[in-house]
Image (cartoon, rainbow, N blue to C red):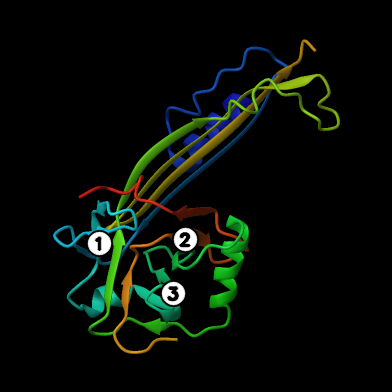
C-alpha cells in the first residue's frame, strides 16, 4: 500500500494527479520517496535584459534579468546582505512567499559545498541589509532545465542497515526541474530509492553582476539549512543568448 499512500499524498498536497509513477513488484519491496515543489513568484517582475546579456567566465553569453533602469518597486525586492566588492557579495531576492528566502552569493568557493553554504550564512549573520540604490546594476543569468539522474553506482548494492539484511537497492533516482527568470523561481525536485529482497559593506555604485561562479540557495526562514543549493561554475544550464 505504500505507492497508494504516496500517490494520495501527492494529490492532496500538490494536486499531482499522475502520482509518483512507481510500480513495485513484490509485497515486501520497500520504497522511500521525496517530493518538493516551490513556485516563488516576484511581486514585481524584474527587467528582461536579454539585449545586454551576461558573458559568463567561459565566454558564453547567457540570457539575463535584473535592474538596469532604477525602479523603487523592483529594487525593494533586493536586499544586499553582504558586500565587500563587486566580486564578493550576497543578495536576497524577495518573492510573494513570506516563508522562503532566495539567496545568491558571488564568492570564492570553499573546500566543500556545505562549507561554502556555512561561510555564506556566517557572512550575513546579524548584518543589517542594505538597499539597492540609484546607479546600482543587477544582472542575473536565467535558468530553465529539467534533469533526471539514475544513480547506477548504487544499484544492486546491499543495504547495511540493521533489520534490512537481505535487501539490495534495485533503483535509485533523482529529478530536478528548475527555472529562474524575471518572474520568479520554480523548483520541482523528486527522488526515490527502492529496495527488494536479495537473492544473496558597500562603497559607491555597485555592479552586482553574476558573471562568475556563484552560489544559489532556496531556504525556508525557519530552516537551519537550505532545501535547495546549486553552485554555478559554468554556463551549461543557463539559457543561452
Q: Is residue 223 visible?
A: no
Proximity of marks 1 and 3: CB atoms separated by less than 8 Å: no
Q: Nearer the viewer, mark 1 or mark 3?
A: 3
Image spot of residue 132 (x, y percent): 32, 81
| Residue at the image position 26 percent from the left and 53 percent from the top | 62
- Residue nearer the viewer, 167 or 137: 137
Q: Is residue 132 above or below residue 230?
A: below
- The residues bearing labels 1 and 3 have C-alpha atoms spaced at a distance of 18 Å
Describe residue 238's horizontal placement relative to residue 159 as left or right.
left
Instruction: Describe the element under mark 1 as helix, strand or loop.
Output: strand
Q: Which label is found at residue 215?
A: 2
Give the residue number, with chain letter if any, for mark 1. 65
Sequence-earlier tag: 3 or 2: 3
User: Looking at the rendering, which quadrant does residue 200 occupy?
Assistant: top right
Q: Of callouts 1 and 3, which one flags the residue occurring earlier in the amino acid sequence?
A: 1
CA–CA distance in space, label 3 to label 2: 11 Å
Please report the residue visible at 26 percent of the width from the left and 73 percent of the height from the top: 74
Extreme-right residue of the structure: 162
Residue 155 drawn above or below residue 180: above
| Residue designated by label 3 | 89
| Quarter of the picture holding the N terminus | top right
Mark 2 element type: strand
Please give left or right for residue 218 compared with residue 239 in the image: right
Cα distance in 3D space between marks 2 and 1: 17 Å
Task: Answer with the quarter of the image where residue 152 lies.
Answer: top right
Where in the figure is residue 233, as x and y percent of width and height?
Answer: 43, 54
Residue drawn at point x = 38 percent, y = 68 percent: 93
Which mark is drawn over residue 10?
none
Contact between labelled residues 1 and 2, with CB atoms less than 8 Å apart: no
Amino acid at each position: 500500500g505504500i505507492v497508494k499512500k504516496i500517490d494520495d499524498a501527492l494529490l492532496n498536497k500538490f494536486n499531482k494527479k499522475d502520482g509518483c509513477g512507481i510500480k513495485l513488484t513484490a509485497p515486501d519491496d520497500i520504497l522511500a520517496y521525496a517530493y518538493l515543489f516551490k513556485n516563488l513568484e516576484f511581486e514585481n517582475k524584474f527587467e528582461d535584459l536579454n539585449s545586454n546579456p551576461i558573458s559568463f567566465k567561459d565566454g558564453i553569453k547567457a540570457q539575463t534579468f535584473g535592474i538596469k533602469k532604477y525602479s523603487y518597486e523592483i529594487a525593494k525586492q533586493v536586499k544586499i546582505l553582504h558586500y565587500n566588492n563587486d566580486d564578493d557579495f550576497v543578495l536576497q531576492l524577495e518573492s510573494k512567499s513570506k516563508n522562503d528566502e532566495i539567496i545568491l552569493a558571488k564568492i570564492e568557493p570553499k573546500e566543500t559545498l556545505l562549507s561554502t553554504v556555512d561561510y555564506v550564512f556566517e557572512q550575513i549573520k546579524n548584518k543589517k541589509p542594505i538597499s539597492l540604490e540609484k546607479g546600482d546594476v543587477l544582472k542575473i543569468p536565467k535558468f530553465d532545465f529539467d534533469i533526471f539522474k539514475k544513480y547506477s553506482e548504487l544499484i544492486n548494492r546491499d543495504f547495511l542497515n540493521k533489520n534490512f539484511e537481505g535487501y539490495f537497492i534495485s533503483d535509485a533516482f533523482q529529478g530536478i526541474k528548475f527555472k529562474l527568470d524575471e518572474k520568479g523561481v520554480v523548483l520541482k525536485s523528486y527522488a526515490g530509492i527502492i529496495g527488494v529482497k536479495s537473492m544473496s559593506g558597500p562603497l559607491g555604485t555597485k555592479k552586482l553582476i553574476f558573471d562568475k561562479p556563484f552560489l544559489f540557495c532556496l531556504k525556508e526562514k525557519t530552516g537551519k539549512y537550505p532545501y535547495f543549493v546549486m553552485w554555478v561554475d559554468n554556463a551549461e544550464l543557463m539559457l543561452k543568448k
